[in-house]
């Protein structure tokens, strides 16, 4: 459900969520920006050259605007704004990017939403759009293996290609929450439900199913947006054509690229000794796995948007208004019914989604069926595939795990990263006592030999030593995808772009069988309605 849908909410009572009525806990007041004792910050663009004279002029200009204040000057690279918000107020970031500097006492307004998208939100959407692009290209190869259409004779006819593209659009629509192709089309809401260990689209929701909050995406619009060169280079450093070619290569040759016996020989032997079945990795397994990465990014995009939504920023101003008659840098204070804490925002969104689904499908969906639950595996999957989760989000999983997942994802996508001492220690901790979640998620990111190279390099790093440069080249020979070569200051790795968890292939084989049985990514209730239509 897009955040814009919340504009149609019925306003609650004006005193229901008014922060002006809140008591101050234990008599301790928060130090708001309007307080003269608040230590204000001036952020300057670290990518620009600043002389000491320019900084003196900047301090003097802000001292004239805000008399009696003390300012701390901090360097900030615009690139970091894709990974963490500068502020809840988009206007503050807009001023920073336009001027090359900003003070956190200015641009504090909530009446300019929609005019400027902060880079943090853009990163979430770019990651989601690019994953739509990846999955679209993936289904072109894996669709026949999933039973979505008959395999075509070579070369495929134009009619068959048209059928394939239409079916891919429908399958993506089921996963993305909308059967319509482009933004602006009339949206038919599709619930995101739990089914057979997967999160899938559903149009015939029962009264017992849990329905998840997630960003709604128009498939064709996302696919086209992802092919913008600047979007691809921001997350991959490659062209759309290079990404599509690599995806097709790895999915087509999945059984060779993702070979558990070759990549994890000791684990393979131990499982065989226990009598475990180890299925070969087929295109259908890879596509089923990535469908859940797509869902993870949908949920992460919604979560990030909720925590930075206009009502949440308005709530911060209303709390400040309870102490200061006119909050600094805020020319307009929103009415109470237009503000919300993050939990209240969730509650309103859940009620709205339940109402929309009930109206759209003629059934009865209750608020209690709506959930924002996010498993640690999904959080890690979102970070791995480009979602940059703000440190202030209310997450339960440890911060180092998310950071390490994001670091591995950037290395695989862009082909370059640096290993510092802190991350080296996290890698060693992983090896020492991994939790079940860490073992399932992280160990399949590389082969056993590549992990050993990383661990060896991590063990030799010191707190005051140099960073270790790491490069990662996408494999082109499916028979020999993995390689590691080390010199004094460089570790050169080779491997697949995709991070299919080869050690969990048996689980994904069971889930792929579910998708094959129900002919796609709509849960059974929706499948029966679609066939009757």
Image (spheres, helix red, strand yellow):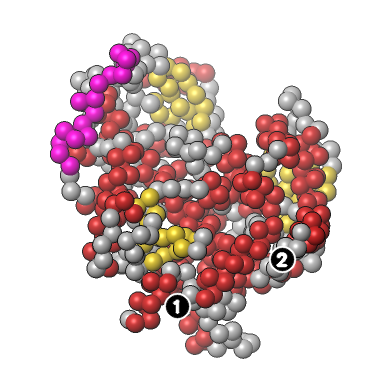
Instruction: Please name whichever residue, 110 or 210, is drawn nearer the observer in this view of the structure.
Output: 210
Residue at the location (26% across, 53% down)? 352
Please check the rendered image and state whether residue 439 is part of the magenta-colored stretch, yes or no: no
Decide which of tag 2 and tag 1 comes sooner along the chain.
Answer: 1
Residue 511's spot in the image, x, y percent?
56, 66
Give the left or right position of residue 270, taking residue 36 as reference: right
Mark 1: give few (<14), some (14-19) or many (20+) Cα within 10 Å: few
Instruction: Please name whichever residue, 338 or 465, is drawn nearer the observer in this view of the structure.
Output: 338
Residue 123's spot in the image, x, y percent?
48, 48
Q: How many marks?
A: 2
Please check the rendered image and state whether residue 24 is part of the magenta-colored stretch, yes or no: yes
Quadrant for the C terminus in the image = bottom left
Q: Main secondary structure of the magenta part?
A: loop
State the extent of the magenta-drawn residues as a range: 12-29
Residue at the location (52% across, 50% down)? 378
Residue 68's spot in the image, x, y percent?
33, 10
Q: In this figure, which residue is indicated by the disc labeled 1?
A: 166
Q: In this figure, which residue is indicated by the disc labeled 2?
A: 277
Residue at the location (62% across, 67% down)? 509
Q: Nearer the viewer, mark 2 or mark 1?
A: 2
Q: Is residue 505 above or below residue 380?
A: below
Instruction: Please name whichever residue, 326 or 74, is drawn nearer the observer in this view of the structure.
Output: 326
Helix, strand or loop status at disc 1: helix
Residue at the location (71% across, 69% down)? 280
Residue 98's spot in the image, x, y percent?
40, 37
| Whether residue 140 can be seen here | no
Helix, strand or loop status at disc 2: loop
Question: Outermost residue toward the front?
Answer: 274
């Amino acid at each position: 459900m897009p955040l814009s849908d919340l504009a149609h909410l019925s306003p609650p009572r004006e005193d229901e969520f008014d922060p002006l009525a809140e008591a101050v806990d234990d008599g301790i007041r928060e130090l708001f920006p309007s307080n003269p004792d608040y230590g204000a910050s001036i952020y300057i663009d670290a990518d620009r050259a600043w002389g000491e004279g320019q900084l003196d002029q900047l301090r003097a200009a802000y001292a004239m605007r805000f008399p009696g204040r003390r300012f701390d000057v901090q360097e900030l690279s615009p690139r970091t704004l894709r990974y963490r918000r500068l502020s809840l107020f988009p206007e503050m970031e807009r001023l920073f990017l336009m001027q090359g500097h900003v003070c956190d006492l200015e641009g504090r307004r909530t009446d300019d939403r929609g005019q400027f998208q902060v880079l943090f939100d853009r990163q979430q959407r770019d990651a989601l759009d690019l994953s739509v692009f990846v999955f679209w290209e993936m289904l072109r190869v894996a669709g026949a293996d999933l039973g979505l259409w008959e395999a075509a004779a070579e070369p495929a006819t134009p009619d068959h290609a048209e059928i394939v593209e239409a079916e891919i659009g429908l399958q993506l629509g089921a996963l993305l929450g909308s059967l319509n192709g482009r933004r602006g089309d009339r949206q038919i809401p599709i619930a995101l439900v739990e089914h057979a260990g997967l999160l899938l689209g559903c149009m015939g929701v029962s009264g017992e199913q849990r329905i998840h909050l997630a960003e709604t995406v128009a498939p064709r619009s996302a696919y086209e947006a992802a092919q913008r060169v600047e979007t691809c280079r921001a997350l991959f450093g490659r062209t759309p054509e290079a990404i599509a070619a690599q995806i097709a290569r790895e999915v087509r040759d999945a059984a060779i690229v993702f070979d558990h016996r070759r990549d994890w020989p000791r684990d393979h032997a131990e499982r065989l000794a226990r009598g475990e079945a180890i299925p070969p990795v087929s295109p259908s397994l890879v596509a089923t796995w990535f469908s859940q990465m797509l869902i993870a990014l949908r949920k992460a995009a919604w979560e990030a948007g909720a925590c930075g939504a206009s009502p949440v920023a308005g709530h911060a101003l209303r709390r400040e208004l309870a102490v200061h008659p006119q909050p600094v840098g805020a020319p307009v204070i929103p009415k109470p019914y237009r503000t919300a804490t993050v939990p209240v925002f969730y509650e309103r969104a859940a009620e709205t989604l339940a109402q929309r689904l009930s109206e759209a499908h003629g059934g009865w969906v209750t608020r209690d069926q709506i959930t924002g639950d996010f498993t640690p595996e999904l959080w890690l999957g979102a970070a791995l595939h480009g979602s940059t989760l703000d440190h202030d989000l209310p997450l339960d999983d440890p911060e180092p795990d998310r950071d390490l997942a994001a670091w591995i994802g950037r290395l695989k996508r862009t082909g370059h990263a640096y290993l510092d001492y802190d991350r080296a220690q996290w890698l060693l901790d992983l090896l020492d006592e991994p939790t079940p979640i860490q073992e399932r998620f992280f160990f399949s990111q590389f082969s056993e030999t590549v992990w050993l190279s990383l661990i060896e390099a991590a063990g030799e790093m010191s707190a005051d030593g140099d960073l270790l440069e790491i490069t990662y080249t996408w494999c082109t020979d499916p028979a020999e995808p993995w390689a590691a070569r080390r010199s004094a200051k460089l570790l050169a790795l080779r491997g697949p772009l995709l991070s299919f968890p080869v050690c969990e292939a048996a689980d994904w084989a069971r889930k792929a069988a579910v998708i094959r049985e129900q002919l796609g990514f709509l849960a059974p209730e929706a499948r029966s309605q679609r066939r009757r239509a």
